[in-house]
Image: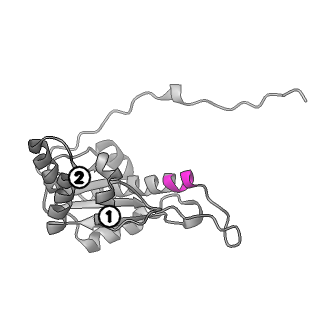
Amino acid sequence: MDVMTAVLTRRSEHQLVEPAPNDEEFAYLLRAAATAPDHGRLRPWRWILVRGEGRTALGRCFADDYDGPRPRREQMQTKPQRAPLLATLVFTPVPGDPAHRASIPEWEQLAATSAMAGSLILLLHARGFGSVWRTGRFTRSERTRHALGLRPEERLLGWLYIGTPHHPRPSRRRTPEDITDHISVFTPQLLPL
């Protein structure tokens, strides 16, 4: 699949079943995704793969952290069961060290992390896997952070739910919209001194 086709046919897939990429295939795709723009090649991120019983434990964590009505709590517990693989994206900003490398602002590191994740989503799609990006209140949950072993300086960005689309549909190309109103051209002007 060429890149333009991947971009124009990718959709968020909400019903995902086995198979999902195994650890080796995920690492293979991630090696390619990690070539996305990343000033300083800091790789300020890491992935935690959640499968099988890990999904059940994460669901219990979600339910324990939810303080709403019981039926909704049970629904929280089943969220991680929506896909065979939950790839958990953790942002690990690298602090600047002027003695060894130029300080790269945290916003730029977050942009690099986002570029890598976007590339991974397209690579998964090109391989026939479906995915959907999930965030929400549990990304800020201390209980979830603790269960996943996050360090204080790390930020949980969300989960990429990955698997095979349950009801594959034909790859319908999106029609790109006119976005010319979002583009301007810089024209230098003589400014008074």
- Single out the residue that lies furthest toward the right: 193
Q: Residue 161 location in percent, x, y?
A: 24, 54
Q: What secondary structure is marked by label 2? A: helix
Q: Is residue 74 left or right of residue 152?
A: left
Looking at the picture, which amino acid does disc 2 mark?
Answer: Asp
Q: Over which residues does the magenta segment extend?
A: 106-110
Q: What secondary structure is marked by label 1? A: helix
Q: Residues within 10 Å of mark 2 (few under 14, many from 20)?
A: some
* Residue ID at (65%, 68%): 97
Looking at the picture, which amino acid does disc 1 mark?
Answer: His
Q: Quadrant of the N terminus?
A: bottom left
Q: Give the number of the disc on residue 35.
A: none
Q: Which residue is mark 1?
A: 146
Q: Nearer the viewer, residue 132 or 29?
A: 132
Q: Which residue is mark 2?
A: 65
Q: Main secondary structure of the magenta part?
A: helix
